[in-house]
Amino acid sequence: MLKDINLKLNSALQEKTTSLFKDTYVATQNQVSRQLNVKIGFDVLDQNALVALSSQEVLSQSFSGIAEDLTSSIQDIITQAYHTPKGMSFANMQKEIQATTNLTDFRAETIARTEAGKIASSARKNSYSKQSGFAEFKFIHIGPDDNRTTSTSRRIKKRCGKGVLWNEYIRIMNEESAKEFPTWKVNPDAPLSHWNSRHIFLKV
């Protein structure tokens, strides 16, 4: 039963995320289209970016790890019930399994939100790059400023000021992300400053 849960959960996570990615890409492309007041078509560049980002090995590994952790945790709960002197009531087992599932949901949501952020970032960058004069476009870093905002996002926003060229934007993001998230890799074709980031770039 646990092996079955593992396989089905991993498959469901992949399926839902792939669907989310396509919707996110197209929605972001439409936002840029409205901002620039131009028609931006979905072409080979977009399809290739979507396939590449949706097929990331790290994404598959992350989801696989979640499924394995969940089934392992359920196995531990069942084993604990068998080894408890008076046994564990069904209600208590249910509570523990629910708590484990809630944590799994949170982890899956964090991963999906982070990867969807990369998808949106890729769509935005590709949409801008299709326009003549992209090399002269200036970009700002914007997003919410509250108790969840990281120092990294605040520093990037400050350094970008009223707008910087694309290559400068990527350089700033790399430098600032490395300070707080040394293992994070900024993809210049789908830039995100850290996991679960709520900040985006926009053309001035």
Image (cartoon, rainbow, N blue to C red):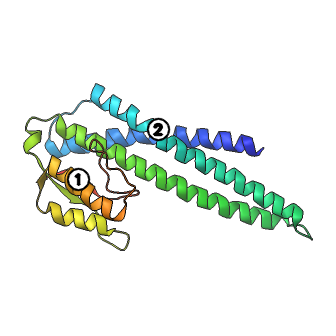
7 horizontally vs 22: left or right: right
Q: Marks 1 and 2, how far apart in space?
A: 24 Å
Residue at the spot 69% in from the left edge and 61% down from the top edge: 98
Residue at the spot 23% in from the left edge and 42% down from the top edge: 125
* Category of crowding for the residue at label 2, using alpha-carbon neighbours closer than 10 angstroms: few (below 14), some (14–19), many (at least 20): few
Number of disc labels: 2
Say what amino acid the circle numbered 2 marks: Ser
The answer to whether residue 84 is above or below residue 160 is below
**Could you tell me which secondary element the residue under label 2 belongs to?**
helix
Residue at the spot 66% in from the left edge and 40% down from the top edge: 8
Regarding residue 199, the answer to whether it shows in the image is yes
Q: Which residue is mark 2?
A: 19
Question: Residue 27 location, x and y as percent?
Answer: 32, 42
Residue at the spot 65% in from the left edge and 53% down from the top edge: 69
**Could you tell me which secondary element the residue under label 1 belongs to?**
strand
Q: Residue placed farthest to the bottom in the image?
A: 147
Q: Quadrant of residue 23?
A: top left
The answer to whether residue 141 is above or below residue 191 is below
Question: Residue 127 location, x and y as percent?
Answer: 22, 38
Q: Quadrant of residue 30?
A: top left
Question: Residue 139 location, x and y as percent?
Answer: 15, 52
The answer to whether residue 122 is above or below residue 186 is above
Q: Residue placed farthest to the top in the image?
A: 44
Q: Which residue is mark 1?
A: 201
Residue placed most toward the observer, 81 or 24:
81
Regarding residue 144, the answer to whether it shows in the image is no
Say what amino acid the circle numbered 1 marks: Phe
